Image (cartoon, grey):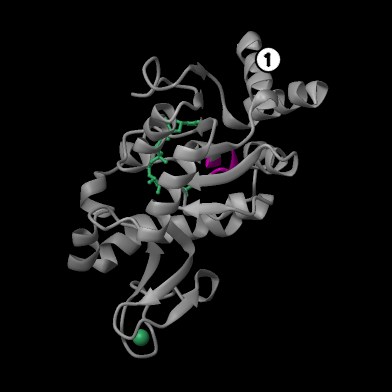
Amino acid sequence: MEALIKQAAKDLAACKEAVALTGAGISVESNIPPFRGKGGIWEKFDPMEYAHIDAFMNDPAKVWNTLLKDMKEVMDRAEPNPGHLGLARLEALGKLKTVITQNVDGLHQLAGNTDVIEFHGNFAWHYCLLCKTRLKTGDVDISRIPPRCACGGIFRPEVVFFGEMIPTQALWRSRQAASKCDLMLVVGTSAVVQPAALMPVIAKQAGAKVIEINPEITPLTGSISDYLIQGNAGETLSAILAELDALL
Ligand code: NAD
Ligand code: ZN
């Protein structure tokens, strides 16, 4: 692992334009549970029953009670961890251009990254299913579930549920960033949700180096990624940055 951290620092020092693809794993150290993997929400319930748009439309109260209420409470309290801060530092150093994130927690922006593509939308805003009024998540009153707008419509978060389209702009910009970069950091994603998991494939095909940071192997490991640094995002990125500081 030591050797791979040194290697990653060397690769970052040599690259011109890095892009990061992040998943729920980078926010685990901010106490936001991931979907899959150890301690994941899906150990408790079936995603298709709760995180699918059909499930939400059929029974909004059920999805609010099982998934969204907890998510709102956890995300209201969450703060960036050394993983997010490490990526912000990489941008400040002029190495990292864009963060493509599958997360909806807004922590990359809070950490200081300025070009963040929210592939699956965000949990910062909600809108009314009827009149489309937008409301900051903090202002959504959840004392009654499902929360309702003054017009009587039900509020939903601006996240992309399973079964929904990726916002066109996010998809288009991500593909462009992936095909232009010469290094892609893939941090804390199980790389099984499509089309997000295609971004490292696009980067690889365009000749970029692909480095994974994850405590567990993924479908990219050993095929698409050049190497996997098997560890937590926070400590691994901090260690890489310490090495990189010595090189630059
Ligand atoms: P995932 O839940 O499928 O996978 C999480 C991955 O993170 C696993 O591969 C796991 O090994 C790894 N991991 C666990 N702890 C880690 C750590 N400390 N450091 C680095 N990696 C760690 O996540 P996904 O690939 O992002 O896909 C699931 C979907 O879940 C996404 O589309 C996202 O929208 C949604 N989601 C978002 C949040 C969030 O916004 N924070 C939280 C849960 C789920
Ligand atoms: Zn309304």
Residue 51 seen in render: yes
Residue situated in front as seen by the camera: 161 or 117: 117
Name the foreground residue: 222 vs 235.
222
Left or right: residue 106 versus residue 133 is: right
> Magenta: predominant secondary structure element?
helix
- Find residue 124 and report its horizontal and vertical position in percent: 51, 65
Front position in the image: 120 or 90: 90
Rendered-image quarter of ligand 1? top left
**Pointer 1: residues within 10 angstroms few (<14), some, or many (20+)?**
some
**Picture mark count:** 1
Residue 85 placement (x, y as % from top left):
69, 41
Residue 68: image quadrant is bottom left
Is residue 22 at all visible to an observer of this figure? no
Q: Identify which amino acid the numbered label 1 is placed on.
A: Lys
Quadrant position of residue 19: top right
Q: Position of residue 109 (x, y in %)?
A: 62, 54
Q: Which residues are magenta?
A: 27-31
Is 114 displayed left or right of 65 in the figure? Answer: right
Instruction: Please name the residue shown 28% across and 67% down the image.
Output: 61
Residue, disc 1: 6
Q: Quadrant of residue 4?
A: top right
Q: Is mark 1 within 8 Å of ligand 1?
A: no
Q: Identify the residue shown where x is 39% and y is 22%.
A: 224
